[in-house]
Image (cartoon, rainbow, N blue to C red):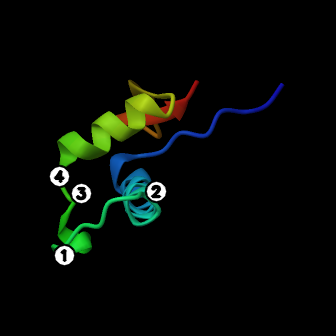
Amino acid sequence: MEEKKYYTYEEIKPIALQAMREKLQNSEHKYLGNIEKQFDNKVDVGIWLKQNGYVRIRKQINKERKFYYVKR
């Protein structure tokens, strides 16, 4: 069985931002503003994570209890 990979928010945020930017650049309509500032808030990242099958869980690893994201 495949071992699940746990990501922290800091690890998964650049992945989500890059995917959202690529989707916007490949869309039909053009965005005239700064694309680097388009998706930099936690709400947009959370929505993207939920739409792409990631679940937020609270887990203790190495005596640290944090939120982690895991792909379903």
Location of mark 1 (residue):
34
Q: Circle 4 sits in a helix, a strand or a loop, which is it?
A: loop
Q: Dot 2: few (<14), some (14–19), or many (≥20) neighbours within 10 Å?
A: few
72 with respect to 29 (left or right): right
Pointer 4 with pointer 3, Cβ within 8 A: yes
Location of mark 4 (residue):
41
Q: What residue lies at 40% left-to-right and 24% top-to-bottom?
A: 57
Quarter holding the C terminus is: top right
Mark sitting earlier along the chain (2/3) = 2
Q: Which one is nearer the viewer's eye here, 53 or 56?
A: 53
Residue 42 x, y percent position in the rendering: 20, 46
Quarter holding the N terminus is: top right
Mark sitting earlier along the chain (4/2) = 2
Say which amino acid is labelled 2. Answer: Ala
68 is higher (above) or lower (below) than 14: above
Instruction: Point out which mark residue 19 bears.
Output: 2
Say which amino acid is labelled 1. Answer: Asn
